[in-house]
Amino acid sequence: MSVDLTYHGVRYIPESSAPQSSLTIHDLKREGTKYVRITWVDLVNNIRYRIIPLPFFEKLLQTSRPGTSITKASFGIIFAALADGFNPTGEYLYAIDLSSLRLCPYASGHASVLGWFEEKTPLPGLTGMQALEVDLCPRTILRRVVEHAREAAGVEFLVGFETEFILLKNVQKIEAVNQHGYCNSTALLTGTPETQALEEIADALMLSGIELQAYHAEAAPGQYEVVTGPMPPLQAADALIHTRETIFNIASKHGLTATLAPRVFLDNCGSAAHAHMSIHSTKGASARPSAHENLSEVEAQFLAGLLEHLPYLTLLALPTEPSYKRMADGVWSGGTYVCWGTDNREAPVRLCNASSPSSRNFELKTLDGTANPYLALAGVLGAGLAGVLTSKELEIKDCAGEKSAAQLSEEGRKALGITARMPLTWEEARTKFAKSVIVDSVFGEDFKAKFLSANKTLKEQMTFGLMDDEALKLMIEVY
């Protein structure tokens, strides 16, 4: 029996990776569920929820528009401050999306569900129709991008995440649960609190219907990674939020603090939320080769659009000041040059499984756990889609040599078409974001203004009057 050695890795396609049928009220009762956490994620990536007793949740589902009322200011409330552009008047209806309903094995008797922010009273839409959708709703924004890609370009996406986090046994003086490094067996010794926590996290994710591919120790002290399988973008972001809640809660149960903070230890690597994205054409473009080895036509166009706009979208993926302490050259965080490379961890976009079309994907390395995943994915996929819609030519060549872009000479970079850098600071990222045309196209100018305002208020609340160690402790507590 011959084996085609050009194909390796598990093959995923959109049809087979779609989410399974959702839970029902009957399922919740059978599982002994008492409460449902109606959950949403705000502009600064705070996970928020209201706990509803199951009997009342069942009553909500029997109404004409099942959901709960939430103040419009919720998008602009950062700690005790209200960001500019938001005010205390008005309410949205947070409409329940039953397809997102999951059990919470980390909290006995609880389930969680996400939804869509809607206007209580329909507003005139752009087409003259009465519109309910809220342009600030992160899930709505991502859903629109996915639908537009399918309808306008015949393109679908799958996304999987690597969630890196650090387990701390002491937050007051920032002490990791252990000092063991990348994949070391001593980081997961039987019976230790961290091993018990990781096994329980793994069990809980699988019980909640999320495909767990692996978990292991990472390079920094107390650092671990959980890898979850690919799903359509909206469902992948939903699963990521559930994964984070699972990690936070189970770590706490074992007396530990889990943090997604981008850089806890300045003498070691930081934590990211790498997204693996695959592009699938319903029009056959996935099979048509491009001028670049190991890239199809649609993949090359997508990558060209992504790289063109990535510096202007960085604020969505790296929204906090500590994010830029992680993103640097020489620490395997994606580097600071706008480029891509086959299995190059010093490139913002790494091509994985390059020679295997059935499992090939792009890894976005410039993304961390402080980012709202719905907004980051909407920006990244929207930028790539723009490249597909305009048949954009990929002018940057594969940076796959022994040297990273930072190690090449200026002439060496120019030979590969590498001429731009990523934002090196939070301030620079904000400036580029404010000028971005793709942000206006994907999100709208009102969203841009309000996101910038909320992002600025977050920074002020996280650092005002605090020393560096105090700011780090707050970052750990919030993220």
Image (cartoon, grey):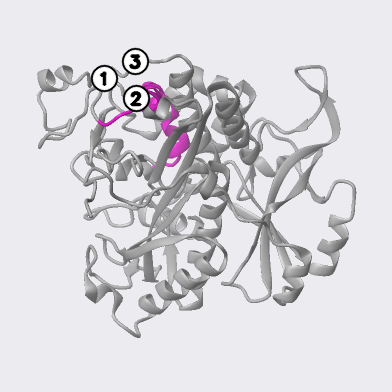
Residue contact between numbered discs 3 and 2, judged by CB atoms under 8 Å: yes
Name the image quarter holding residue 395.
top left
Q: Which residue is drawn at 23% across and 74% down?
A: 185
Q: Residue 393 carries which label?
A: 3
Residue contact between numbered discs 1 and 2, judged by CB atoms under 8 Å: yes
Which badge, 1 or 2, comes first in the chain's sequence? 1
Eye-nearest disc, 3 or 1: 1
* Relative height, residue 22 to residue 130 (above, below): below
Eye-nearest disc, 1 or 2: 1
Which residue is at the far front? Answer: 1
Report the front residue among 396 and 80.
Answer: 396
**Which amino acid is tagged 1?**
Ala
Task: Tell me where residue 328 appears, x and y as whole percent.
Answer: 25, 40
Tag 1 residue: 291
Tag 2 residue: 300
**Is 313 covered by the magenta stretch?**
yes
Q: Can residue 37 be seen in this view?
A: yes
* Relative height, residue 369 to residue 295 (above, below): below
Give the secondary structure at mark 2: helix
The segment highlighted magenta reads 294-321
Q: Would you say 7 lies left or right of 158 here? A: left
Q: Label 1 to label 2, Cα distance in Å? A: 8 Å
Q: Label 3 to label 1, Cα distance in Å? A: 9 Å
* Relative height, residue 395 to residue 247 (above, below): above
Q: Which residue is drawn at 21% across and 47% down?
A: 5
Q: Would you say 134 lies left or right of 223 here? A: right
Q: Would you say 92 lies left or right of 163 here? A: right
**Which amino acid is tagged 2?**
Ala
Give the secondary structure at mark 3: loop
The secondary structure making up most of the magenta span is helix
